[in-house]
Image: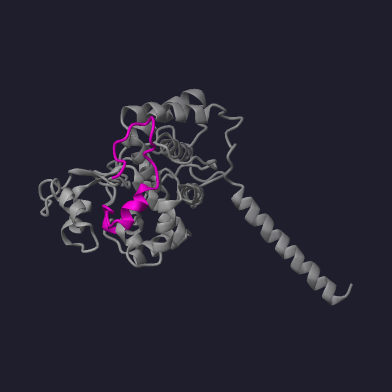
């Protein structure tokens, strides 16, 4: 056989093997992973989330944030759910999580019901991924197919949580770098930031902005200053809605998860410094303007970015474990 033909065949074989390898990696998570082993999984998760969000709408945002904080620390492996013990340091007391992340009881309830239906089958990481999707949808946001098949970590990293989770005080370059380091684009970052259409923030996370930033609507700053003192020694835990336009609308009727967050940014009414950085004469201004007028595009981009974020470094196969209790390793 001629050398040229051999070279072409060799190159073809290498490309084929590479594509199969990539396909195998991407196929590790799939939407119907529990189709046989736990066919009622998604119904169980949805029912608990529906009841929880009806009782306390804020929980939809809390679970979504919990998923984000899980995925950004060594991948979507349920590590953020682990409690500290005398011999184990988890991530719950990292700077971005301490007295801030919430919704653990909801995940506990889902896990208990899932275990009753499908013992030792479904990971806490997958439960959290489904719950984040359902909480978003219940508040009027988009839905998406959730790839499943994650396993749970036996470890956690408080130091990685401290270094990798975005700060509410971060500038645009830092935000883009943090997301790029995870394999997510600046567009993903701007779309995912739209989760701040729902939820609340504590005063200490935005006090510097409302008293010191110049790219802020003064009437908005004054309104927020009425419940958030400049010295957060007292009042630092006072809450304010991340989206001033639709903070407390009912679950029926007008959606709460919407593109008003981006309209806030254009009007210089982003609550966090990191929010307003997305529209501050920088690289994301045009995308913010697009999302502010086209909710359909925002929803599409948000759903796609959530799937990409959910694919960050999953534990699969025999790696990790299926926790019986989401707060503790087996």
Which percent across, then down, holds residue 121? 52, 32
Residue 100 x %, y %:
26, 44
Give residue 250's position: percent from left, percent from top: 33, 31
Q: Residue at x 29, y 61 (%)?
A: 170
- In which quadrant of the rendered view does residue 240 lie? top left
Q: Nearer the viewer, residue 278 or 88?
A: 278
Extreme residue in the right direction: 1
Image quadrant holding the C terminus, namely top left
Q: Give the residue furthest to the top.
A: 116
Residue 72 visible in the snapshot:
no
Closer to the camera, 283 or 182? Answer: 283
Spot occupied by residue 136 in the image (x, y as percentages of width and height): 42, 39
Compared across the picture, whether 32 is left or right of 305 comes to right
Residue at 59% x, 42% y is 30
The N terminus appears in which quarter of the rendering?
Answer: bottom right
Q: Main secondary structure of the magenta part?
A: loop
Let me know if residue 249 is in the magenta part: yes
Magenta extent = 245-274
152, above or below 270, in the image? above
Residue at image point 88% right, 75% down: 2
User: Which one is nearer the viewer's eye here, 268 or 283?
Assistant: 268
């Amino acid at each position: 056989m001629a050398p040229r033909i051999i070279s072409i065949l060799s190159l073809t074989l290498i490309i084929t093997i590479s594509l199969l390898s990539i396909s195998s990696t991407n196929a590790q998570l799939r939407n119907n992973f529990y189709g046989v082993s736990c066919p009622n999984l998604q119904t169980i998760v949805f029912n608990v989330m529906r009841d929880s969000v009806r009782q306390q709408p804020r929980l939809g945002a809390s679970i979504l944030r919990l998923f984000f904080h899980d995925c950004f620390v060594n991948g979507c492996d349920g590590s953020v759910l682990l409690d500290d013990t005398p011999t184990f340091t988890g991530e719950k007391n990292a700077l971005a999580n301490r007295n801030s992340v919430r919704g653990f009881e909801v995940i506990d309830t889902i896990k208990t019901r899932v275990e009753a239906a499908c013992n030792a089958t479904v990971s806490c990481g997958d439960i959290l991924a489904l719950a984040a999707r359902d909480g978003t949808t219940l508040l009027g946001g988009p839905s998406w197919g959730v790839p499943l098949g994650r396993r749970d970590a036996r470890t956690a990293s408080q130091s990685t949580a401290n270094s990798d989770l975005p700060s509410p005080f971060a500038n645009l370059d830092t935000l883009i770098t943090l997301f790029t380091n995870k394999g997510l684009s600046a567009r993903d970052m701007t779309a995912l930031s739209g989760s701040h259409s729902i939820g609340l923030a504590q005063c200490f996370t935005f006090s510097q902005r409302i008293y010191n930033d110049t790219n802020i609507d003064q009437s908005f700053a004054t309104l927020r200053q009425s419940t958030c003192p400049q010295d957060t020694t007292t009042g630092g835990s006072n809450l304010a809605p991340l989206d001033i336009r639709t903070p407390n609308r009912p679950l029926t009727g007008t959606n709460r998860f919407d593109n008003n967050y981006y309209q806030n940014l254009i009007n210089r009414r982003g609550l966090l410094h990191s929010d307003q950085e997305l529209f501050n004469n920088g690289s994301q201004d045009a995308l913010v303007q697009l999302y502010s007028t086209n909710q359909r595009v925002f929803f599409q981009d948000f759903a796609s970015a959530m799937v990409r974020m959910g694919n960050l470094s999953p534990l699969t196969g025999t790696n990790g474990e299926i926790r019986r209790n989401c707060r503790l390793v087996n």
